[in-house]
Structures are given as C-alpha cells and as structure tokens.
Amino acid sequence: MLIEETVTNWLNEKFTEESFRECYVVDVHHSPKKLEIFLDSDGVLDLALCTKINKWLGRKIEESDLIPDAYILEVSSMGLDRPLKLHRQYVKNIGRPVTVHHQNGHIIEGILTEVKPDMIIVQQEVIEIEKKKKVKKKVETIILLDDIIKTFIQIKF
C-alpha cells in the first residue's frame, strides 16, 4: 500500500473518534523528504487541532516505520487559496461567494446557493437592459460537478 493510502486510512480511522468526527482528509502528498496532509472540517479546524493531529500522526508513522528516512510532516487546513475538491467542502461553503472554472473555459462568479450529489447552483448577478434601462437580476446557473475544473472561495473584505 502506498504511503498516501496508509496515512489516509489512519486519519479516516482517527476521525471516527468523537473529538475529531467533523474532520476529513482532502489531500495527501508524499515526496522523498516531505509529507503534506491537507484537512478540512465541517466545523472549525484550528491550529490546535492540526497540531494534535500532526503529533498523533508523527508518532504513528515513527512506530510503524512507514517512512524510514528523515522527512518533514506538515498537517494543515485547506485554506482559501486552495480549490475545493470534495462534495463535502461544497456543502460546507453554501452561501459563500465562489469562482468556478468550467471545462468550457468560462469562469462563473457568484454565490454558491445549493449543492446536489452531481451539481452545484451558483447565483449570479447580471445586468440586463429593459426598456432602455440597465436592470440587475439574479440568475441561477447549474453546473455539473464533472464539468468543474476548480472552484475557489472568493475572499471579500
């Protein structure tokens, strides 16, 4: 079994414990000198929780000798600079502004209003001309998950 699979399985088992139940693995990357774990949570995933998971995982790796050579272990939350990857992340971010990169080359910006098993709905504000006046309207765009290249949460201040 690959290192990434082993680590993912360990974490998924850990996340059945009550204090970690809202956490889930988004991505695991292993290179010869570094193991990066990206997590998310249905609740709050703060530095203290990432530190607990990091310490637990570091001990588990050492005990099993999964990575025999020296390595750096990084456990972190996904952060807003990384795209959404899992259906669960879309659900968590309903109501937030998103930028969706579609396979057809279009970029769709708006509010993520709904998530279904195979699609998302993004509400966009468009300007239409009615009776020679510009009118703002809200339009819902349905996007199949299979058609999405990447989706980012927009950071608004």
Image (tube, rainbow, N blue to C red):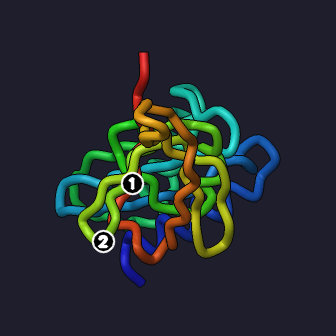
Direction bottom: furthest residue: 1
The x, y position of residue 69, in whole percent, is 22, 60
Label ID, residue 7: none
Q: Quadrant of the C terminus?
A: top left
The residue depicted at 57 percent of the width and 42 percent of the height is 138
Report the front residue among 1 and 139: 139
Q: Residue furthest front?
A: 131
Instruction: Give the CA separation, mark 2 to mark 1.
Output: 10 Å
Q: Amino acid at mark 1?
A: Val
Graded by Cα atoms within 10 Å as few (under 14), some (14 to 19) or many (20 or more), the crowding at tag 1 reads: many
Q: Residue at x 24, y 65 (%)?
A: 105
Q: Residues within 10 Å of mark 2 (few under 14, many from 20)?
A: few
| Location of mark 1 (residue) | 100
- Look at the picture and state if 50 lies above or below 109: above
Residue 87, quarter of picture: bottom right
Q: Residue 88, position in %: x, y?
A: 63, 58
Left of 49 or right of it: where is 5?
Answer: left
The picture places residue 82, in percent across and down from the top left corner, at 35, 46
Toward the viewer: 72 or 94? 94
Q: Label 2 belongs to which residue? A: 103
Residue 78 in sight: no
